[in-house]
Image (cartoon, helix red, strand yellow):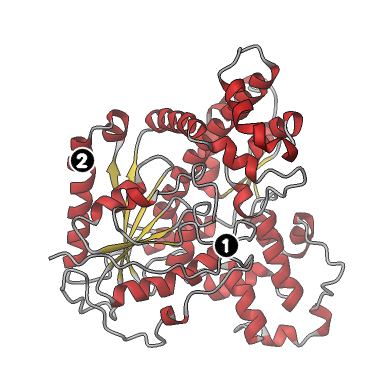
Amino acid sequence: MIKKSRKVENPNNPSSNRIPGPKKMLTPSNSSTQHHTSPNGSDCPNSNSKPKVIVIMGATGAGKSRLAIDLASHFPIEVINADSMQVYKGLDVLTNKVRPEEQRGVAHHLLGTISSNVEFTANDFRDFAIPLIDEISSHNLLPVIVGGTNYYIQGLVSPFLMEALCEDTEINGSLDTVASEQSNPELKIEREGFCYTYDCLKAIDPVAGARIHPNDNRKVHQYLKLYSRFGIPPSKVLQEKTSKNWGHVDSSRFNFCFICVDASLAVLDSFVDKRVDHMIESGLLDEVFDIYRTDADYTKGLRQAIGVREFNDFFTRYFQPPSTQSFKQTVHDILYGPSDDDRKVLLTEAIDKVKMNTRRLVRRQKRRIQRLEMLFGWEIHYIDVTSSISGAYDEIWEAEVVEPAVAIINSFLNSESCSENTNDNTKDITLKLRDLWNQYVCEACGNKVLRGAHEWEQHRQGRSHRKRISSLKKCDIVSVKLH
């Protein structure tokens, strides 16, 4: 008999712009030996009682949420959303949130609960998700993490997060290698007036500078913040304290089963284009116009979502907040008006940008999943959904997607050992991790910076790089440098 999913109250204060903490009742136990029973009733004897967790990954449009809800017919589940835009309140159409009527009574956590003006990091997601998993597991239910934000999932799986490292050192006042360094006043840097730039990081710590992309401002800031507090090169801290466990599943407090719903790029591209058109018809522009501000910051909160900034030029040129009442009718007239209308031309360009940027997101998501498997040894079960989403046939979806997923999960739940996620190729993975600290610069492509052999190989095989090399084949030019 399948136990019905619980209804859980929203743990957030809707009137607050501050990221609220999880409910006190959800605080995880401090005991690492607390016993958990799997949802099917079988015990897991060799796992130090790690709760079992299902993770459904995949690119935008692949059907992650649909699969999760369908699994509720086979297992007693609750869903934890791991989409970095769906966690926010608002823009339900644009972010493609699962509507209440589509949830079919399955409890969904972290779905539209965070204030749209705050930055909800991987560290925040981890701090919310861990007690939720413990609470769900304590009711003999199966937690299912669903989302395409892979750094959220990695933050939950891996004990290492840069944000957590910075916070821990600030609170505890020491790291294993920090205490002696911190006592040296010559190594301290005054926070006031400190230069948080990539060039500054390269000057202080060339190894860390080679590890990250010059445009990754968030990580540059984190690394320099760590150095400004303790005067220790970030690369030294990472290599000595955390690099051995970074990204690895076997060091996690949970036992994970990773399922990736995957489809061909051609099918996903077509699906994305149709979905954007459907979103426009369903009121996407009304949603975006409601949060439109001429001085908006598109680097924080919900405004980072694809489909917000793309319409900024259109709104700025033709609309201002006082025209809100007539906006809906005016946009309708533009959408279905003459094709040579300047307003329609600009609006069509904006819609095309949304489609293009979403297709690019799909490619990034696919690459990141491959990277998690290749570099960190994640055992990911792939399910091909190409036929089912291209034809939209329910019988194909059930036979080719749901049934294989059920079989994978049953095997996972019934396994004698809950440590199925370990990888025998530890040496190979370690070498790949070390390569992450190598930086490749393609001079032929305007000194494009790439991290690790994996990114370099993908770039080298790309059409734009090959075309550029072909045009420069008669020139004496170095195509790549390794730093």
Question: Residue at 72% of width from left, 50% of height from top?
Answer: 297
Which numbered marker is on residue 400?
2
Secondary structure of the residue carrying tag 2 is helix
**Which quadrant of the view contains residue 408?**
bottom left
x%, y% of residue 389?
Answer: 31, 34
Question: Looking at the figure, which quarter contains the N terminus?
Answer: bottom left
| Residue carrying label 1 | 121
Q: Is residue 400 above or below residue 121?
A: above
x%, y% of residue 335?
Answer: 57, 22
Q: Is residue 434 above or below residue 45?
A: above
User: Residue 158: in sight, yes or no?
Assistant: no
x%, y% of residue 454?
Answer: 50, 46
Looking at this view, is 420 or 340 the one in front? 340
x%, y% of residue 275?
Answer: 44, 33
For label 2, count other residues whose C-alpha is less than 10 Å away and answer few (under 14), some (14-19) or many (20+).
some
- Residue type at tag 1: Thr
Q: Is residue 161 above or below residue 290?
A: below
Q: Is residue 280 left or right of residue 168?
A: left
Instruction: Give how far apart the Cα atoms at labels 1 and 2 are.
Output: 35 Å
User: Residue 264: in sight, yes or no?
Assistant: yes
Which numbered marker is on residue 284?
none
